[in-house]
């Protein structure tokens, strides 16, 4: 069993509103889990039920084999880091970090040693006598992080901890959070609506929608094999086509695409999804003999957006916008330009096929 944390049919209702709907998950000791989903999907509510700040309507929070629903937050010995750093403005950096240790009546010598350890962990030893107002946002968040880690919590929960920071600092700090987690081998549960953040740091990602878990898995599996059109749309970018499937063909608008994905349903209404980097771009006249003609579609480049390593093309095909990502070097070499007529190729094996449901806008 170890120090595993289990959510069993966990439910939270506010009157007639169900914020979290019978979710189940086992989090292993030392695992880094990210709850990912749009605003209002219930991810922070789950975090608050785990910490004890929110009562459980139904189901169980189990830690080390024991149900802890009834325990007050202080008895759970979990650390928490909020979006607002919540540092004490009248205390220095070292006093902020020492605060939780003093509350636990630790002896002064041990407190001093632990504060030094924490400051070294995040490279803030030289800032120890400064007050929060004298620090940058990134430095304040580092202090909030090690203040939560100082009492050696069994689980650390982080609620959108980096969302108030600017993009560059956020990327640097998320790498630091991951490094700390690996170094300390701590169980961490991280809430975010930023898919890039979740995919880059988590061991497993839990994708949420409307209070339910839509998919739980390793980042690469969720990206490559999304379980529904919602996940395909929310995690990464996808192009969608609605159509009618007959065996390995899908009629969508004027095209009949060949698909390679086997599925239980061989016919009926479906949604096709395809990632932008899977769509191949050809100029008229370029050799395309090896391609399935049915999946080769003419279009015109409407918008060119430089993304760094890749160039994103928005291509108009029969009045529909399709996004295709081309490696920057290839884009340069082939001299692709806005307004140019091109051919898009949709490889049959690159299509993901889902029964028609609601595709998120």
Image (cartoon, grey):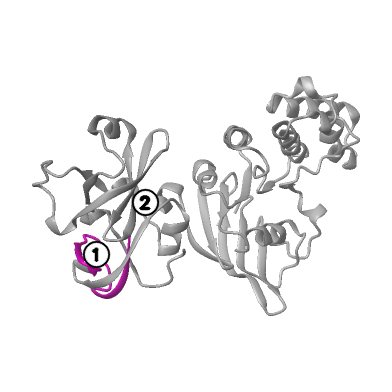
Q: Residue at x 76, y 49 (%)?
A: 77
Residue matched to label 1? 262
Residue 258 in picture, x, y percent from top left: 18, 62
Q: Position of residue 86 (x, y in %)?
A: 80, 44
Answer with left or right where residue 138 lies relative to residue 210: right
Work out which residue is located at the far front of the displayed protein and give it. Answer: 339
Cβ–Cβ under 8 Å for marks 1 and 2:
no
- Residue 286: x and y in percent read 13, 41
At 87% from the left edge and 37% from the top edge, which residue is drawn? 89
| Quadrant position of residue 66 | bottom right
* Above or below, 234 relative to 155: below
Residue drawn at the location 30% of the way across and 61% of the way down:
319
Q: Position of residue 221 (x, y in %)?
A: 40, 51
Q: Residues within 10 Å of mark 1 (few under 14, many from 20)?
A: few
**Which contiguous range is marked in magenta?**
251-273
Where on the picture, by quarter, is residue 164?
A: top right
What residue did someone put label 2 on?
A: 224
Whether residue 228 is visible: no
| For residue 253, above or below residue 53 | below
Residue pictured at 83% horizontal, 32% vertical: 133
Secondary structure at numbered mark 1: loop
Indicate whether 61 appears above or below 195: below
Mark 1 / mark 2, whichever is N-terminal: 2
Q: Secondary structure at mark 2?
A: helix
Q: Which of these two is toward me, 310 or 110?
A: 310
């Amino acid at each position: 069993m170890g120090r595993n944390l289990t959510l069993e049919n966990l439910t939270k209702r506010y009157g007639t509103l169900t914020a979290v709907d019978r979710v189940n998950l086992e989090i292993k000791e030392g695992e880094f889990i990210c709850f990912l989903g749009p605003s209002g999907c219930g991810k922070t509510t789950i975090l608050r039920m785990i910490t004890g700040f929110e009562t459980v309507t139904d189901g169980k929070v189990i830690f080390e084999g024991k149900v802890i629903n009834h325990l007050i937050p202080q008895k759970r010995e979990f650390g928490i880091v909020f979006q607002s750093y919540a540092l004490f403005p009248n205390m220095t950096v070292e006093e902020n970090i020492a605060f939780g240790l003093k509350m636990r009546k630790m002896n002064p010598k041990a407190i001093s040693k632990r504060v030094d350890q924490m400051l070294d962990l995040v490279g803030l030893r030289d800032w120890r006598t400064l007050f929060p107002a004298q620090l940058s946002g990134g430095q304040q968040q580092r202090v909030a992080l090690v203040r939560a880690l100082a009492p050696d919590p069994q689980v650390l929960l982080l609620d959108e901890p980096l969302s108030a920071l600017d993009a560059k600092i956020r990327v640097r700090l998320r790498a630091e959070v991951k490094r700390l987690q690996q170094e300390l081998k701590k169980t961490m549960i991280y809430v975010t609506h930023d898919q890039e953040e979740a995919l880059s740091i988590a061991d497993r990602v839990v994708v949420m929608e409307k209070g339910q878990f839509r998919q739980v898995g390793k980042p690469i599996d969720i990206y490559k094999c999304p379980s529904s059109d919602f996940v395909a749309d929310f995690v990464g970018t996808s192009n969608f086509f609605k159509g009618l499937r007959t065996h390995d063909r899908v009629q969508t608008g004027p095209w009949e695409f060949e698909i390679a994905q086997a599925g239980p349903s061989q016919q009926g209404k479906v949604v096709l999804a395809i990632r932008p980097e899977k769509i191949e771009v050809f100029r008229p006249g370029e050799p395309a003999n090896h391609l399935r003609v049915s999946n080769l579609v003419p279009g015109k480049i409407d918008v060119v957006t430089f993304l760094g390593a890749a160039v994103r093309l928005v291509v108009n095909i029969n009045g529909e916008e399709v996004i295709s990502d081309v490696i920057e070097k290839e884009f340069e070499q082939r001299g692709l330009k806005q307004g140019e007529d091109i051919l898009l190729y949709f490889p049959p094996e690159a299509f993901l096929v889902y029964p028609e449901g609601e595709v998120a806008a």
